[in-house]
Amino acid sequence: MFPGAKAQSDFVDVLSYDVEISLNDSSNLIKVKESVRLRFKEDCDNFNLDLESSYSENKGMTVNSEVGVKEEGNKVSFNHQNHRLNIQPINAKKGDERTYYFEYSGIPKDGLIIGKNKFEERTFFGDNWPNRAHHWIACVDHPSDKAKINFTVIAPKHYGCVATGTLQKTETLGKGYKKHTFQSKYDLPTKVMVIGLANFAVNPLETDLGFPTSVWSYQKDSAQGYSLMKIAPGICQYFIGRIGDYPYEKLANVQSTTRYGGMENAGNIFYDEMEVKGKHSMEALIAHEIAHQWFGNSASEADWEHVWLSEGFATYFTDLYWEKQHGVDRFQERMKHERDRVIKFARRSPAHLVDEHYTDINQLLNPNSYQKGAWVLHMLRREISDLAFWSGIRSYYQKYQYSNATSSEFFDVMEEVSRKELDWFENQWLYRKGHPVLSFDIQEENQEFYFEVTQEQPGEPFIFPLEISLKDGEIQKLRVEEKKQRFKLPSNVKLGDIEIDPNVNLLWEKF
Ligand SMILES: [Zn+2]
């Protein structure tokens, strides 16, 4: 997390950002005019916005001291150092709403990536995850302070321009410039507010979704980009049916220079430019980023340690889409592969899924947040039934859409909907390291045969259902609750004839 972000949020709640950004082709200097509308959560004599300071000539942002910071049009005191724009309001009381205006300029060190794409063409792409928006937008750079964003982009007229929200108008200015004005109706975390400018080919997609969908690829990649990304509306339709209405104004699928494979920016997903190539499929990546529109963008983690509410959800909802689209076998293959990732990661760096001890947010982009998070949802679905799972997912989404949740708030909803006590489940999978490491044995006693399960991992036993399949193919479901536990078998069965977890429903490892 960016230092101090929590403390700032204690004083103010940002309602909206209006950001006018001017770009040019002769340098990477940006000029920004920004208005921030906010509400005071406490009586307050100073508060901070995150804004990267200048660190050498023109690098980082310098606030225009002649304009200063204006509160409802009147100058107020401010200072800008250590990446914080500290503003001193006049007599601000809890509940007051005010607008602050200021201007700044500089070369962004990060966040807005100005450079060349794979065709050596100049491009501009916002890439904010997790808290890099403050390199080019003065903001509370934390997902818990959601706000509306209205971008106005002034740039050389040869660029196509995509941005969060709906394009209101494009005006031709003098000297070869154009002005693109966007407006967004929805409260968003800063991590998914972006602009993107490149030499785009734009292909609208015909759908009956009720909102515009499109593919934005580089002109030189346009046929390939279109053919790979045109599946997006179909995927989106599946999630709408399962979760609820699509949360944003549009779904633009954009080829870009993001540092990630894909970045789920709200309503305009940025895919890494190298993903657009050959016969390479983007299906799983597109499903992951579209699932984020509901989970991560709209229902967001309240703080970074709950990031599995974004990444674990996007991972599992891709698996669920896979199950529907490609069948149970392919779904199980994915779950096995994800389980392998979790096991390897647990050996290398054991940590809780909800890990409050991270020092760098980027460390949380790990198999715990993605694959273990997906497995937690998978086991939860098996624990409470498909019906309760889907109904719980819809309730959770409805309750926290355009808002934020913690892991326990998610489980509160799932408990309520399934009418099951799930504390034990939450504690063992979210707040405990590792997973069951199991060995098995067959024992004979008085001509009866027993299947013995031993939990070899250190510490208390895990509690879980274990499915086994005997020779006749019939599946038995055993409830394992002890470190060593045995179950009567119907007849003498060899260990080699018992298939453990045949339907890939348990996160476990063979001892
Ligand atoms: Zn993701």
Image (cartoon, helix red, strand yellow):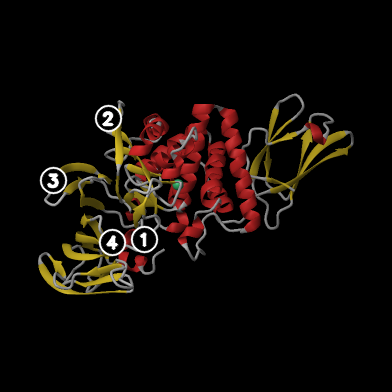
Whether residue 419 is visible to the viewer of this picture, yes or no, is no
Mark 3, residues whose alpha carbon is within 10 Å: few (<14), some, or many (≥20)? Answer: few
What residue did someone put label 4 on?
Answer: 139
User: Who comes first in sequence, dot 4 or dot 3?
Assistant: 4
Q: State the separation of the CA atoms marked 4 and 1.
A: 15 Å
The answer to which image quadrant residue 215 occupies is: top left
Query: Which callout, 1 or 3, points at the residue further toward the start of the chain?
Result: 1
Real-space CA distance between mark 4 and mark 3, rounded to the nearest whole angstrom: 29 Å
Q: Secondary structure at mark 1?
A: loop
Q: Position of residue 433 (x, y in %)?
A: 61, 56
**Image position of 438 with respect to 60: above or below:** above
Residue at x 49% of width, y 66% of height: 359
- In the displayed structure, does residue 74 sit left or right of residue 289? left
Question: According to the image, label 2 marks what residue?
Answer: 210
Seen at 61% across and 37% down, the residue is: 505
Q: Secondary structure at mark 3?
A: strand
The residue carrying mark 3 is 172
Q: Secondary structure at mark 4?
A: loop
Q: Amino acid at mark 2?
A: Gly
